[in-house]
Image (spheres, helix red, strand yellow):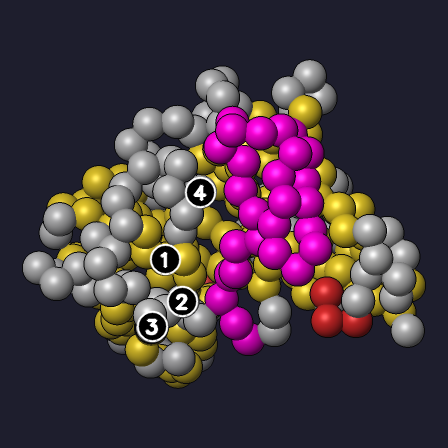
Amino acid sequence: AQSVTQLGSHVSVSEGALVLLRCNYSSSVPPYLFWYVQYPNQGLQLLLKYTSAATLVKGINGFEAEFKKSETSFHLTKPSAHMSDAAEYFCAVSATGANSKLTFGKGITLSVRP
Amino acid sequence: KAGVTQTPRYLIKTRGQQVTLSCSPISGHRSVSWYQQTPGQGLQFLFEYFSETQRNKGNFPGRFSGRQFSNSRSEMNVSTLELGDSALYLCASSPEPGSGETQYFGPGTRLLVL
C-alpha cells in the first residue's frame, strides 16, 4: 500500500525567500507522484507530477520537485516566494497500474510574510 | 475547455437525510473519481468510475454510493447522513483511468450536516 508523509502542518516564509515543502512516500512499486495546491474555497490544482521521465520536475508558477528514490522523497521547492503562493499544498502518490486512486498526505499550509 | 463542474456548491442537511451530489467531468474525460476532504482525516478516496462501472472503492460504509452515466457525468449519494459526513466532496476527472493520469479536480461541494 502507498502512503505519503508531509512533515509539519504549517510553513511560514518571507516574500522572496526559498520555499521548501517536504514529502516522503512509501510504495512497494515505483510510484507516480503529484503535488497539488488548494486555495481557500477551491478545489485542487495540479502543480506538477513525476512519472519517471525525469527526476527533476518543473511545474507551474515556478515550482519544481526532485524525485530521490534513495531517500523516498519528492520535496517541492520554489526559489522565491510570492504572496500569491499562500495556500495549502498536498503531496500525493499513486501506484502503477490501472488504479487511479490518489493517496494524499495531510497537507502543508504555506504562509508568506510581506 | 470547461473544467470539472460540481453541483451544488453548498448544501445543508440534517441527520438521517440523504443527499445526491453531481459532477460533470471535463469534456472527453471518461474517468471520474470522488474524494472526501475533512480537517481531521484529510483527503480520502471514495470511489472511481469508468464506462459506467465502479472500478475501485475506498474504505467507506455502504451509505456512500455512486454511479456514472453514459455521458460520463457522475453522481454520488450519501444515505442516512451523520454529523461526521460534513465535508468537502471533491470530484476529479481524467481522460482514462490509470495511475499516471493527471486528475483534474472540481471546486467541490461543501456539505454541512446538522
Q: Is residue B11 left or right of residue B21?
A: right
**Residue positioned 33% across, 27% down in the render:** A97
Of the residues tagged 1 and 3, which is closer to the observer? 3
Q: Which three-letter amino acid code belongs to the residue tagged 2? A: Gly
In the rendered structure, the residue with mark 2 lies on which chain? B
Q: Secondary structure at mark 3?
A: loop
Total numbered badges shown on the rendered structure: 4
Q: Is residue A111 left or right of residue B43?
A: right
Of the numbered discs 2 and 3, the one sitting upstream in the chain is 3
**Residue positioned 32% across, 51% down in the render:** B94
Q: Which three-letter amino acid code belongs to the residue tagged 3? A: Ala
Can residue A6 be spotted in the picture?
no
In percent of width and height, residue A78 lies at 77, 51
**Residue positioned 70% across, 55% down in the render:** A62
Can residue A114 be spotted in the picture?
yes
Q: Which residue is mark 3?
A: B2
Q: Which residue is mark 2?
A: B106
Vertical side of B78 occupied by B40: above or below: above
**Magenta stretch, residue numbers:** A41-67
